[in-house]
Image (cartoon, grey):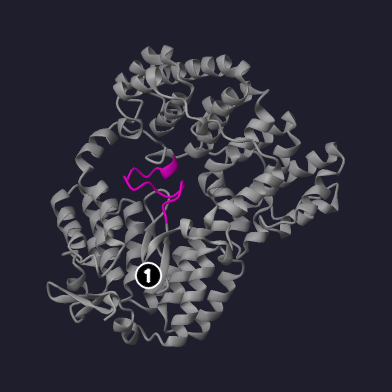
Amino acid sequence: MDKSSERFKYFEYEITGNDRDIDDREHITEEIRAILVKTFEKLQRNKNGVIKELNELIEKYPQIPQFKNQLFNAYTQRGNLKMAHEVNALTLKQHPDYLFAKLNLAADYLAKEEYEKVPELLGPMMEIKALYPDRDIFHLNEVTSFYKIAIHYFLAIENIKAAETRLEILENLPRDLTTDVSDLALRVLSVGMAKNWEMEGLKNTRSKQSITKSVIEPTTQLPVFHHPEIEKLYHYDLWIDHDILKEILALPKETLLSDLHKIIYDGIARFDNIANAELDDDEICFPLHALFLIGEIGDERSLPVVLDMLRQKPECLEFYFGDHITETIWEIILKVGFQKINLLEQFILEGNYYEYARSAVTSAMIQIALHFPDKKEEIINWYKSSLQFFLENKDNDSLIDTGFISSMISDLVDLRVPELESLLEELYRENLIEEYYVGTLEDIKHELRFGMVSPSHKKEICSIFDRYDYILTDWVSYKVDDELDEDDFDDDLEDDLDVGDWDDEGDTVRGVTKPIVRLEPKIGRNDPCSCGSGKKYKKCHGK
């Protein structure tokens, strides 16, 4: 007997890993199941046109809430939270008992710290059977997703005991029913069991809402370019033909730079309009194309333009760049800014911009020091003066972000500078460093004195063509189906439907309608860290 079809009796209900046990209740036929699998795969690969396709499927199958849930996820992936919320509200209105729409809304309440609304939505007992008393069978992923939200709710209100009891439910699920429980339990365990220690570390955390600098008036009009070839960048995603890039790079430098700068400011000026439109990836990659081309040209006059983009609100940067903020933007900053360190310094100290945008700049500074040894002393001196600046302005909430300062310290360790120990002691004493993020003062001192400088700390600087190729062949999210290999995924299969995943800030649940059998991607460098810090894995325990 296939173990995935076995049921597990728990309290007054059964948990199943077999979708057939719930398909009848969900009105899902074999035909609909096959469609759900295909649309989920398109969501996972960020395929073009999936929003349009899902809207058509919703019209054809209005009784199936899973299609609406996938549409919710599609908008969430693209940073269009306004439409995502509208879709989820419609789903709840048309399907008031649909669990994953409830969980999406509950996650929104948690993000807004409207904790009192969560038990109003999911029931005062925060038990799945109490919420659905007439049901005797629940799918495994309904149970895990429900109790995941419940655990985060109880941690938010500091009811650790209640969180632990929900965690125990997940830990007691039989391993032959699912292969995902151990990973999920580890993630929840790190949040729940370490909560007391984490709360101690977080109590001095200071992070105000990111500021945004207005650099251009909003508009709905496309710029007028010197070169019509530039408009091709508005019609291709990262699979753009290299010949198009070569054609653009062959244009006269002065007018080309002017056009590329116009593209950057166009992305800023029209962001609200673009984010609220149902556009495919090939229509929203133009700012990233422009940045890569700017980096390839390497003209220092482009640095202020790049920094103006990084001064924008987090929603704008995540919408256009996503993982590129921490993975590739540093290289562009290095290529145009290694001779303009003073402007990089000014950007870091002038305001509390998005943490990951500021971190991209400091990452570039570290790489400049590693690639250009003659500049190492200059950058170390900048670190000294900037950290001293934060100490002197420790009460200025418009400047102080302890997460960012901790990120600076974490990057600084790569340069091995024990002469900064006394400055670090002051930062720790003034609670400007998050200990749970970078470790204790003694940990840092040991790294500064005795830590080994790994060759991996010095990142490769690539040509634009090698960078595109690397992204498309090494980033799992960009690989096409026939390029994926076993190393990109966990080895075990899992029955998985409608699992809610936490977003990069640890706040919002993505209630994706997933196929019954899938391969779960391993944790990525820009996935939320399982420690519950809310940091990206790369900037936390993935170092």
Please give the name of the residue rendered at 37% of the width and 45% of the height, measured from the top-left corner.
534
Q: Secondary structure at mark 1?
A: loop
Q: Nearer the viewer, residue 309 or 182?
A: 182
Q: Main secondary structure of the magenta part?
A: loop
Whole-percent x and y of residue 212? 54, 39
Is residue 340 on the magenta stretch? Answer: no
Q: Amino acid at mark 1?
A: Asp
Please give the name of the residue rendered at 48% of the width and 16% of the height, measured from the top-left corner.
384
Dot 1 corresponds to which residue? 498
Q: Is residue 439 left or right of residue 382?
A: left
Q: Quadrant of the N terminus?
A: bottom left
Q: Is residue 288 above or below residue 5?
A: above
Q: Nearer the viewer, residue 277 or 163?
A: 163
Q: Quadrant of the C terminus?
A: top left
Please give the name of the residue rendered at 70% of the width and 38% of the height, measured from the top-left corner.
295
- Residue 439 image-quadrant placement: top left
